[in-house]
Image: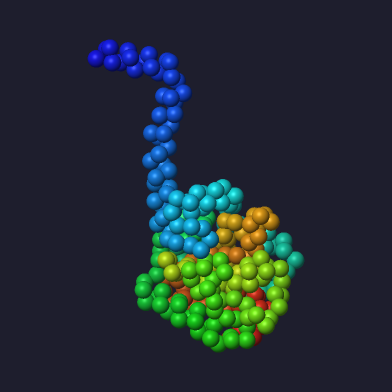
Amino acid sequence: MNTGIDALVSYAHRHPRAITLAALTAVVTPLVVDNYRKFLGLGKSGLSPYGPLGWFVATTLTGFGRETVSTTEYERDANQERWLKVTVERRGVRPVTGWHCVPHRQLDRLPTEVIAKRLEALFEKHATANPTLVEVVPSPHEKLDPGMVIHPDIPSPHKEADQAWREIAHIHAADHSLHVVLSPADCKTAIDLGWAERHPLSGVSRIFPLSSGYLLVYAPRDEEELDVVERIIVASIGYMTGSRSVA
């Protein structure tokens, strides 16, 4: 037995790099595997492939992300127009979101199937009620989910509309959270009251031209929260189309 230990010690002295690499591999591999499984658990997204390549892309992009709940930048914005009329705070702590910024998803405090279907119906209702303002197409961002976009007859009212590829909102089928674009003042309201958080890549740089108004709105859990989320959708339509007459 001593001979075996002596041989191992001798090998370590002669090949220190190999021993160090083996030790690092033993430590890092479980962490990488766990991180990869968590990425897969977020579901498919149109922004990155699903599988090892998608995981690599998502992990790389996450390194460029930032915190998601500060609102100072919205206070400083020259545009302080408001469309959102909400004063009630969301109950409880914020939902946990995935470590990876792509796809940006909510992990807990999810809605029942009944509330999820009600949300989808409200989304469709407002799309149908505003045929001159919006249309529903495959989401320019998510690709896999329907997205509400500015009607092609309406010019983009601001640069944020172009940065968002003229997409107003979409619902994620996996968790029934939403991505929407709101005015700066409405972003402050939605985030401060606990209804939303900014996408980690929003407003980061010209390389990732996502508007700082690109928010994740948490999935509603009951009728009261559904009412607030509906108001957020209406506010997003108003801001992105420049309309004060959203049905």
Residue displayed at 45% across by 57% down: 50
Above or below, 222 relative to 24: below
Above or below, 35 relative to 174: above
Q: Quadrant of residue 117?
A: bottom left
Where is residue 35 drawn, in percent x and y?
A: 43, 47
Where is residue 246 drawn, in percent x and y?
A: 61, 84
Q: Is residue 95 visible?
A: no
Residue displayed at 50% across by 84% down: 125
Foreground of the two, 178 or 24: 24
Residue displayed at 63% across by 81% down: 151
Foreground of the two, 165 or 125: 165
Where is residue 110 drawn, in percent x and y?
A: 40, 66
Q: In which quadrant of the rendered image does the C terminus lie?
A: bottom right
Foreground of the two, 102 or 120: 102
Foreground of the two, 17 or 157: 17
Q: Quadrant of residue 112?
A: bottom left
**Left or right side of 82 for 143:** left
Residue displayed at 24% across by 14% down: 1
Q: Is residue 60 visible?
A: yes
**Left or right side of 154 for 190:** left
**Which color mode does the image show?**
rainbow
**Left or right side of 80 for 89:** left
Above or below, 33 relative to 209: above
Outermost residue, left direction? 1
Q: Quadrant of residue 211?
A: bottom right
Q: How many marks?
A: 0
**Left or right side of 152 for 11:** left
Where is residue 52 drawn, in percent x and y?
A: 45, 50
